[in-house]
Amino acid sequence: MDKIIVIVGPTAVGKTALSIELAKKYDGEIINADSMQVYRGLDIGTAKVTADEADGIAHHLIDIYEPNETYTVADFQKKAREKINEITSRGKLPIVVGGTGLYVQALIYDYQLGKKEEVDDYQLREKYTQYAQNHGNLALWEQLKVKDELAAEKIHFNNQRKVIRALEVFELTGRSIIAPKETPQKCYDDFLIGLTTDRTLLYERINQRVYQMVEQGLMEEARSLLAFPESQAALGIGYQEFFPYFEGKVPLETVIEEIQLHSRRYAKRQLTWFRNRMAPHWFDLVQAPETIVTLEEQINTWLKGVKQHD
C-alpha cells in the first residue's frame, strides 16, 4: 500500500501551515481535499494557500474548476487517487489536506461511488416528487438528512432527482445509496492527523478570520457569483450570506455575523465528523505548538514501519 499523510480538522486550526512544514521535512506534495478550493477565483473565502505560503511546495486539485461547475465526492476520489499515484511514482510523499470529511473518507476507503442501484419504485418516486412540489427542495432534502445522513452530505439539496433516488433506495433496501454492500477496506497506509483546539479559542479565531476576509475583498468574490446563484460554489459559506445584502435587504454587519455563525457551526460539524467516523492522531498546535516534535516522532516511526501489503 502507498503511504500517505492526511491532515484533517476544522477551519482556522493551522492545517495549511502544518502541511507545508511536513511537505518540506518529508519531501512531500500536497493534495487539496477541500470542496471549495477547486474553484478558480474564489481565493479569499476558501482560505486558499497563497504563493508565499506555499513556498515552492507543489499543490494539487486547486483552481481546477470554474465556479459554475459541480464538483462531487466521486470527482475528488478519482482525481486524488490519480495524484497519489503520480506523486508516489516520483518518489515523493502525498499529503492530503482538507476539512471535507466525506471526501477524505471516500479517498482512504474503497467506497464505490456513482454506481446505479438496481432497485426501482415508481410510486415512491411520485410520492417524493409531489412532496417536493408542495414543500420545496430543501424540505425534501431534510427528509433525506433524517433518514440517510451520509447521502444527504453528498447530494446537494437542489438536486431533486438525486435526493429522490437516495430516498427510494433507502426505503427499498434499508441502506444508503452510497454505502458499500460490504465493509469498506483501506486503500492506503495512511497516517491521519487531526488538528483541533479549545472550542472558545477556535470560535474567536474563526470570527477574526471572517473580518480579515472581508477586509481582503471577500465581497467582490461573492459578487462574482451573482451570475449563477444556484451553483455549488455560490452556496458555500462566505458567499451565500452576501446575496441578501446585494439585494439591499440586510446591512453588511448582518452578513459578517451570519458568515461567522455559519463558519462556527460548520467547524463544530467537522470536528464531530472526524471524531465519530475516523480515528486521527489529535494535536493542538495552536495552544501547544511544541507538540509538533511528538507528531514528527510518530510520523518517523510510521515511515520506518514494515510496509503493509494489499
Image: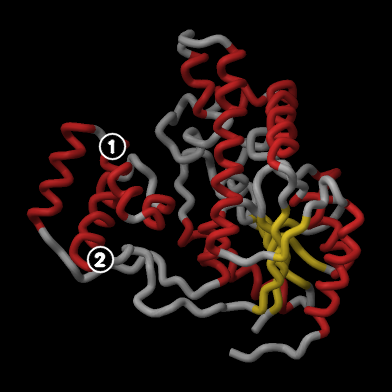
* x then y, percent, for residue 102: 51, 58
**SS under mark 1:** helix
Tell me which corner region of the image, top left, top right, bottom left or bottom right, holds residue 90. bottom right
Which residue position holds label 1?
A: 139
Front tag of 2 and 1: 2
Tell me which corner region of the image, top left, top right, bottom left or bottom right, holds residue 158. top left
The amino acid type found where label 1 is placed reads Ala
Q: Point out which mark residue 174 bears.
A: 2
> Residue at 50% across / 28% down in the picture?
240
The amino acid type found where label 2 is placed reads Gly
> Residue at 61% across / 13% down in the picture?
253
The C terminus appears in which quarter of the rendering?
bottom right
> Residue at 69% across / 28% down in the picture?
207
Tell me which corner region of the image, top left, top right, bottom left or bottom right, holds residue 89. bottom right
* x then y, percent, for residue 13: 74, 46
Q: Point out which mark residue 247 bears.
A: none
> Residue at 38% across / 79% down in the picture?
182
Q: Earlier in the sequence, mark 2 or mark 1?
A: 1
Q: Nearer the viewer, residue 115 or 137?
A: 137
Neighbourhood count class around disc 1 (C-alpha, 10 Å): few under 14, some 14–19, many 20 upward: some
* x then y, percent, for residue 45: 64, 34
